[in-house]
Each structure stands twice: as C-alpha cells, then as structure tokens.
Image: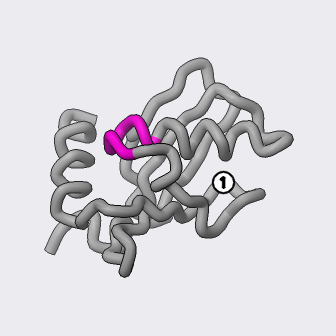
Amino acid sequence: MSKFDEIVKKHKEGITVNLFITASSKRNIFPSGLNKWRKSIEMKVCSPAQDNKANMEVLKTIAKFFKKPYSNIILISGGKKREKTILVKNLNVKDAEKKLEESLDGL
C-alpha cells in the first residue's frame, strides 16, 4: 500500500491526481507537500485565483513536472475551488508515484 493510494488513481486514459492549491504564492512549487487529511498533493502557484489564471498555471506546471504535453493535462473537477482533480493522460500510477516520491523526499 502506497501513501499515494487515495491521491493518485488509475484512469482509463492515464491517472488522476488530487491537488490542494494555494494561489497568489511567491513561487510556483509542485509538489509543496502531502496533505494526508485532504488526501491531496499540495501545490503553490503565483497566479491569482481569478479569471482562470491559477487553473491555467496549475495545468502548465503539472505538464512540465510530468514531462507531458499541455494537451494531456485536463482539469476534471474543482475549477473554482482550492481542491482540484486533474487527469494526466498517458501516464501510469507507478511512474507518477515514483516521481512524486522523489520530489517529496525530505519535505
């Protein structure tokens, strides 16, 4: 059993990831932590939570982190909330968990 079991889930097109976003931060940071109570990966973005700017920055940051085209990252839920679920196409759970584990090591 992985600590990401309820955060990163298999999807027919790839994986889904639960995120908890802090907008208007000083720096973009992904992942910035693991929130066990909210069952999500924490993320900070510089853009404000208005006019969809923070959501766009979330998707771009996730695409860069997983080295996937921007078109492979889709916001599934939470468009106007801090808690979001995204779909990363063409990625498997094992590879995603490994990359997240490496990035969260020491946090």
Q: Is residue 67 left or right of residue 41?
A: left
Q: Residue furthest top?
A: 26
Kind of residue at disc 1: Arg
For mark 1, what is the residue? Answer: 82
Colour scheme in use: one colour
Q: Position of residue 91 (x, y in %)?
A: 29, 60
Predominant SS of the magenta segment: helix
The residue nearer to you, when weighing 99 against 25, is 99
> Would you place residue 93 above or below residue 64 in this image?
below
Quadrant of the frame with the C terminus: top left
Q: Quadrant of residue 47 in the image?
A: top right
Q: Position of residue 73 (x, y in %)?
A: 49, 54
Mark 1 neighbour density, 10 Å: few (under 14) some (14–19) many (20 or more): some
For the point 55% across and 52% down, the residue is 20
Q: Position of residue 38 (x, y in %)?
A: 49, 64
- Label 1 element class: loop
The magenta-colored residue range is: 62-68
Q: Is residue 3 left or right of residue 71?
A: left
Count of numbered circles on the image? 1
Q: Residue furthest bottom?
A: 12
The residue nearer to you, when weighing 84 against 71, is 71
For the point 41% across and 59% down, the residue is 88
Res 37 seen here: no
> Would you place residue 90 above or below residue 99 in this image?
below
Q: Position of residue 92 (x, y in %)?
A: 24, 65
Q: Residue furthest right?
A: 51
Q: Is residue 107 left or right of residue 33?
A: left
